[in-house]
Amino acid sequence: MTVVTRFAPSPTGFLHIGGARTALFNWLFARHHGGRFLLRIEDTDRRRSTDEAVAAIFDGLSWLGLDWDDEPVSQFSRLPRHVEAADRLLDEGKAYRCYAAPEELAEMREQAKAEGRGMLYDGRWRDRDPRDAPPGVDPVVRFRAPREGETVVEDAVQGTVRVANGQLDDMVLLRSDGTPTYMLAVVVDDRDMGITHAIRGDDHLNNAFRQTQLFRAFGWEPPVYAHIPLIHGADGAKLSKRHGALGVDAYRDMGILPDALANALLRLGWSHGDEEIIAREQAIEWFDLDRVGRGAARFDLDKLMSLNAHYIDRTDPGALVEMIRSDLERAVGTDLDPDKTDRLIRAMPELKPRANSLVALAESAAFYVAERPIPIDAKAAKLLGENARSTLAGLLDALGTLESWEQGEIELTIRTFAHDRDTKLGAVAQPLRACLAGTTVSPGIFEVAAVLGREETLGRIEDALGETRDPRI
RNA sequence: GACCCCAUCGUCUAGAGGCCUAGGACAUCAGCCUUUCACGCUGAAGACACGGGUUCGACUCCCGUUGGGGUCGCCA
């Protein structure tokens, strides 16, 4: 049997990390088994569905590298099929029309709650003669659910879960306007799409009972259900859009690499021994449902950043430069010519191990491509006082005589210079850093000078001298 | 409230009855490295929610308690 999984989001907003993880697990499971991963947009509620949301979801999945098979299915487009299925149940006496008005039902629930009873639909139209129907009321179609016995779900993650049928009421299949509800649509669609494994959030566990009953009523076999624990927010409550959940696009904007996010999401509720860093191919090879944990997890941004630092470090320089190119161009205010691009690529090996996001990487790289005179921040400016000026002036002469602009030579020259002046290396290096990088933080200063090149290095030193010298002229 | 699910360091987790003096990762702290900041390295601190069973032996199995979460829509 070929494995077929699906990700079935409702297009009411962006793809948040809970949904992203559900999609990831479905994708991984399908890929692991050489099966298919399908997409279904659950847009039966037309009022709350938007095209932008659909686009955002596709976008998020693509960015995460979760490719799907076949064309995405629009649940709404299958309306005729859903109605047909409901009619069949009606014909077979497995469903019935309910004429209770929404207000009437609300009242019923309120009363039940007040009396401390369950708030289930009481089945008031289950056996009532349709001829009693009040005039002018469009009925809903309800499922005639079994009242005796129990319904059992063999969940691939949660194990055997059972509930007494008395706990389940007669769910609405067709709304009074004739459109199908989620419960009906999901069952018919999963069946028609040949879904073998339904991997979804824990919050659907209760739905699995009803859906199982529906499958049986149709005479179909339900898919294998796998309810994965939810991701909780910092406060331990279910993550939702209004509860601090960010869309995957927010993580992209933070400079997170998709592989890092996928890795972090994977480790939330799934493990393979002590493995922490799991590349995509490895994940596909290892992933299976029996390793999915059962407790809810909280999303830890620190850990994501740490993972991100790792993935940035193992991305090659050229690719990284392209990833931060537009950020850099915006920051510096000019396009990066081949010369500067090359400078960045040579700087990357030292830059990338100290960055935990692309945003941070771009910030740390900006000085390499800044236009002279480069901006000097406040801390750096403090390092360019009078003493520093004379030191830099001397250093300018020493470096100016250098024949080969090579890092080793530069280092030797600077060290010798410091030694001859009987000053600590730091007293030379820090002012130099300040004028070359414009900040107090940068990679090793010898390398910075080497990457910058002779002309740019000497020019930046001159710029600094000019500024400190000016007032005295 | 009813029903369902869950429960190991702050966080994510390893643990399939003796391998556990409970392991790893992130975060934290200390030291080393060092021209700055990082990276890296070394080390420290830090958890089996509680109570009963079962067993020669429970983190592991059972029951209960407590705690947390989820669901109870003509939303999905």
Image (cartoon, grey):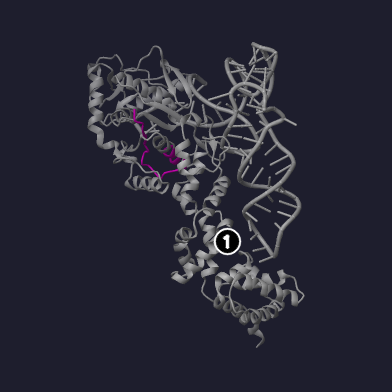
In the image, residue B75 lies at what x, y percent?
Answer: 36, 33
In the image, residue B10 lies at what x, y percent?
Answer: 64, 38
Mark 1 — on which chain does it sit?
A
Eyeballing the image, is B74 above or below A117? below
Give the residues drawn in magenta, as a range.
A1-24
Residue A20 falls left or right of residue A418? left
Q: Which residue is mark 1?
A: A350
For badge 1, the amino acid type reads: Glu
Is A3 covered by the magenta stretch?
Answer: yes
Q: Nearer the viewer, residue A141 or A386?
A: A386
Circle 1: element type: helix
Residue A202 falls left or right of residue A354? left
Eyeballing the image, is A123 above or below A337? above
Q: Quadrant of the C terminus of chain A?
A: bottom right
Is A175 covered by the magenta stretch?
Answer: no
In the image, residue A362 lies at what x, y percent?
Answer: 52, 61
Which of the 4 image quarters holds residue A93? top left
Residue A17 falls left or right of residue A176? right
Number of marks: 1
Q: Specify whether residue A202 is in view.
A: no
The residue at 43%/29% (across/down) is A204
Q: Nearer the viewer, residue A307 or A294?
A: A307
